[in-house]
């Protein structure tokens, strides 16, 4: 599919440059589908709904049991499948701007265009929550108070964020070859550790 691609756990990274002279640079991060999880979910749904139908029709229990089983199934489906995102893409057009695309399993696509003149700097930042720690790629934009996340739904590993970050730096004129970290040390591979105050 692309020139460069690699997989890491549940994500697959693709880098496309299918237009001449590298005018448009496209980076995709796709969620690898897990067939076993879908089969398990289908069997679980059949068991829950079948049991509820049996209790309603044969044992003459209340219909609310049937509705509660559907609610339980919907909750388990949401819990097991997680976010219904197929892939997220970053389309970099150096003279125009950056288009952020999110493709959902339902077929819906959301797009956001950011003009290159509005971008101050792309940043990689480490996000720490009480439960987990992950890396995020965001954009500092002119006249915006908050950072704009590049990948809104997915949390790909740093290994996949670095090529996208480097391409964004090149497109916006930010240097990414060498920088210093907060503690004063040199950053490897141009990764600049910045935090949001």
Image (cartoon, helix red, strand yellow):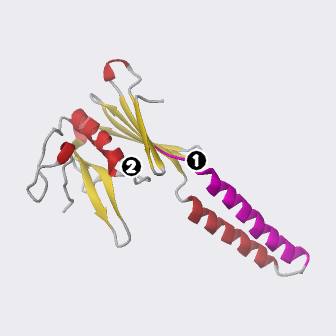
Q: Which residue is mark 1?
A: 105
Q: Which mark is residue 151?
A: 2
Real-space CA distance between mark 1 and mark 2, rounded to the nearest whole angstrom: 16 Å
Q: Quadrant of residue 45?
A: bottom right
Q: Residues within 10 Å of mark 1 (few under 14, many from 20)?
A: few
Residue 30 lies, in percent from the top left, at: 48, 44
Secondary structure beneath dot 2 equals loop
In the image, is 193 to the left or to the right of 33?
Answer: left
**Picture layout, residue 139 above or below residue 40:** above
Residue at 57% from the left image edge and 48% from the top image edge:
33
Name which of mark 1 and mark 2 comes first in the sequence: 1
Residue at 67% from the left image edge and 60% from the top image edge:
41
Residue 23 lies, in percent from the top left, at: 32, 23
The residue segment tinted magenta is: 30-58
Residue 120 lies, in percent from the top left, at: 20, 44
Residue 44 magenta-highlighted: yes
Quarter of the image with the C terminus in it: bottom left
């Amino acid at each position: 599919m692309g020139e460069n691609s690699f997989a890491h756990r549940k994500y697959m990274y693709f880098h496309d440059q299918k237009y001449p002279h590298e005018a448009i640079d496209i980076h995709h991060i796709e969620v690898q589908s897990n067939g076993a999880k879908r089969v398990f979910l289908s069997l679980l749904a059949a068991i829950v709904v079948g049991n509820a139908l049996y209790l309603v029709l044969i044992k003459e229990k209340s219909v609310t049991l049937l509705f509660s089983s559907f609610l339980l199934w919907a909750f388990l489906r949401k819990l097991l499948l997680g976010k219904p995102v197929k892939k997220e893409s970053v389309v970099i057009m150096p003279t125009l701007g950056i288009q952020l695309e999110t493709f959902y399993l339902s077929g819906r696509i959301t797009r956001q265009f950011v003009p290159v003149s509005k971008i101050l700097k792309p940043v990689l930042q480490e996000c720490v929550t009480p439960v987990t720690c992950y890396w995020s790629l965001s954009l500092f934009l002119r006249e915006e108070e908050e950072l704009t996340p590049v990948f809104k739904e997915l949390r790909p590993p740093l290994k996949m964020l670095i090529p996208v970050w480097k391409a964004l730096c090149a497109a916006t004129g930010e240097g990414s070859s060498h920088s210093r970290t907060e503690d004063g040390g040199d950053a490897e591979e141009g990764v600049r550790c910045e935090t949001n105050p």
